[in-house]
Image: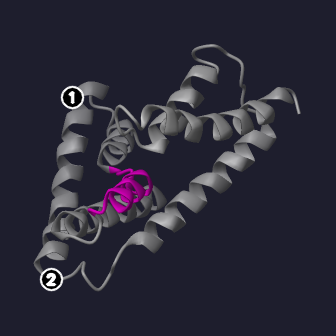
């Protein structure tokens, strides 16, 4: 391991983030994930440079991403996500993909492979981040939460299929 202090910093951020949520909760409600991401950016190699990636951190990151996707799928109420809402979400993702690829073609100077990668990335969602926030605010079981779940599920599943094909 080339940067043994990185794991300690990750643990410190995991302890500090809920404390920051509690401290700011009296004035403004900030979701926990906002502090977690912010602390990771600040401590990471692009700002302060305290934490650096290595094999152990990369493995833990992959495991964490897998768990995040699993937990997002666990939050979806599949009985509520059907009918017209599901049909709209299934049609909207390919439309967004075509728009993303077209935009990426303009940005990439016509490189088709790069345009497909960028276009697919533009259509991906952060459902694993959004659903816990909706659950905590009590919005997940309402109409808004159902629509977000349907569109987010398709927005998570579609890019996985597209990346597998690429």
Q: Which residue is mark 1?
A: 106
* Residue under the image location 59 percent in, 61 percent down: 67
Furthest toward the front, the residue is 26
Question: Which of 14 and 26 lies nearest the eye of the viewer?
Answer: 26
Q: Which residues are magenta?
A: 124-139
* Foreground: disc 1 or disc 2: 2
Q: Measured from the top left, where is residue 17 in percent x and y?
A: 57, 37
Image coordinates of residue 131 in percent, x first then y, are 37, 59
Residue ID at (37%, 44%): 121
Q: CA distance from mark 1 to mark 2?
A: 36 Å
Quadrant containing the N terminus is: top right
> Most prominent secondary structure in the magenta stretch?
helix
Above-or-below relation of 80 to 16: below
Disc 2 marks which residue?
A: 83
Circle 2 packing at 10 Å, graded few (<14), some (14-19), many (20+), is: few
Q: Is residue 137 above or below residue 153?
A: above
Closer to the camera in the image, 63 or 134:
134
Verify CB contact (< 8 Å) between mark 1 and mark 2. no
SS at mark 1 in the image: helix
Q: Position of residue 24 (x, y in %)?
A: 44, 32
Q: Is residue 13 above or below residue 162?
A: above
Give 19 or 7, whichever is nearer the viewer.
Answer: 19
Residue 49 is tagged as: none
Q: Which structural element holds mark 2?
A: loop
Residue at the farthest bottom position: 79
- Count how many numbered circles sit on residues in the image: 2
Name the image quarter holding residue 63.
bottom right
């Amino acid at each position: 391991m080339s940067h043994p202090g990185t794991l300690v910093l990750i643990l410190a951020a995991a302890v500090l983030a809920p404390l920051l949520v509690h401290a700011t909760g009296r004035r403004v409600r900030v979701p926990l994930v906002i502090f977690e991401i912010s602390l990771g950016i600040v401590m990471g190699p692009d700002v302060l440079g305290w934490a650096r990636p290595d094999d152990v951190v990369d493995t833990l990151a992959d495991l964490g991403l897998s768990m995040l996707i699993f937990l997002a799928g666990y939050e979806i109420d599949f009985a509520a996500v059907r009918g017209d809402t599901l049909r709209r979400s299934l049609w909207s993702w390919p439309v967004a993909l075509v728009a993303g690829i077209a935009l990426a073609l303009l940005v990439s100077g016509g490189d088709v492979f790069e345009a497909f990668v960028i276009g697919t990335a533009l259509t991906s969602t952060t459902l694993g981040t959004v659903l816990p926030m909706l659950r905590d605010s009590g919005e997940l079981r309402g109409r808004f939460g159902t629509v977000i779940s349907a569109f987010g599920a398709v927005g998570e599943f579609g890019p996985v299929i597209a990346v597998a094909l690429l």
